[in-house]
Amino acid sequence: MPDYKKNIKYDYTKPESIVKYARSMEGHTLEEISEEPIDEYKGKGGFGQILERYGFNYEINSDVHADFEEVGIELKVSPLTTSKKYISRVRDINILNLKVKERMVLCMFDFNSFDISLRHSHLWEKISDILIVFYRYQSNVSIKKLKIAVVFRYILEHRYNDFLIINQDYKKITDLVKIGKAHQLSEGITNYLGVCRKGQGGKKENKQPQPNSSILTYRRAFCFKISYMNQLWKEISHTYKHRDVFSRTDLENNTLDEVILNRLRQFNGLTMKKLSEKFHVYDYNNKSHFRTIINELILENKKKESNEIKKAGITVKVIRIKNKNKMPFESMCFPNIQYKELVEEKCWEDSHLYSLFSSRFLFVVLGQDKQKDKDARIIDSFLWNMPSEDEQIAKEFWQDCKLKVRSKDLNHFWKISDDKKFHVRPKGKNSLDLTYNTPDGDGWKKYSYWMNASYIRDIIINNIDFK
């Protein structure tokens, strides 16, 4: 139980009093809230610790129970940063052009208590009732001068479909531990609830034993994935443009993965031409043509996107392969390199490229004989996440890109001919199409990240039975 100071301005035995007091902080900095000088604090977790100490007036502690133990409410903070897609459109920084900066770490993962249901676990105390304080993050600004944007009370049992999917994730995580595969845990294997590395990182980080295996593994923590947090923020800030697609019955009887794949696989063997006629989508020259049809198959509405898929951070990729040798017609493209952000990134697990590559992928594979064949036929679909051994190569790729950008050497990125699974190539419309989001502010050519076509072929062959 927290050690409360005297003269606190709320009743810590009443949830409504705690929430009301917290909401009175909206629009204010920690410095404005505190009635005493705030000691300077540097490092991760600083905002949350200052908020506990000077905002809610209880001593910082490492208690395993909920922060407001008397009422079972956990206190969490979530930093918001500017969404790049709005920078050029909106002059003033306001609630509409913000996004969540990082995953929300919930609690440490205990490898010795994996045989417990979610409702009886330590994790349940941390996620069943959360008071989330969203604040506006700004680099090079003192923590005590950062402003609280929104306070939101998150009650998991009021979000029953979310609970069902989080429970599925929890079971998948604990099932891996039961069979001695804790070393294979990553954020990419689950949908809303993830596990992330929790340690100093690098070669100095010590691994620890795991049950039912002699293989050592890293310390990990449960977390809400950044994709889940961003959709939650959009809901709270009323910038929500998606809808729940899957019913309570769907998710009670099947996992989210099964629901998605069952909807798609009923169309296996059909040509895109027949599906175009079925759903009245005829714009073959539009690159989004196939994606529009896939939306119709999964969501039964081509104009909407699934809230569940967005929360899970599932990246949908339509891959067209040659029937003869199963080679994709092209490598897989990812967003352009953000040069300035890349050189400022300090940790692989917090990098933009990691968020791209560690997401779950929904591959919808089409077989065809010619690249512009309207009779491309759906072969199969599957969900995939990058295995840990490939993540290590991806980390080396990120480190190389960072080194090249820092030295302004854009001519020696990894090439497709290097056969290292990933490469970089130009992405601008022409030589005059430049970006100024660079370390020195000069205009640089646009380059983007790619996954090699040969790597995609190997993934497909390992996940589809072509017999």
Image (tube, rainbow, N blue to C red):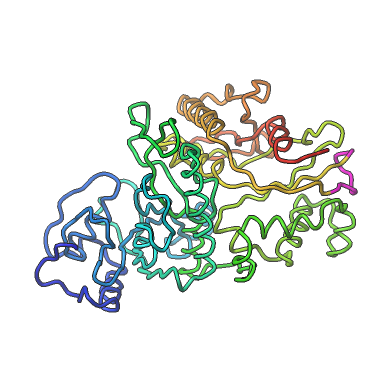
Give the x, y percent position of residue 343: 44, 34
Q: Position of residue 273 (x, y in %)?
A: 89, 54
Out of 151 and 13, give the one closest to the viewer. 13
At x 74% / y 54%, what residue is drawn?
A: 291
Residue 261, percent from left and from top? 70, 55
**Residue 192 x, y percent position in the rendering:** 51, 56
For residue 460, side relative to residue 242 (left or right):
right
The answer to whether residue 292 is left or right of residue 55 is right
Res. 275 in view? yes
Residue 437 in view in this figure: no
For image coordinates 32% across by 35% down, the residue present is 200
Work out whether 306 lies above or below 46. below
The part of the chain drawn in magenta is 369-377
Identify whether 198 is placed above or below 201.
below
Q: Is residue 417 above or below residue 464?
A: above
Residue closest to the eye, 119 or 81: 119
Instruction: Answer with the quarter of the image where residue 212 lies.
Output: top left
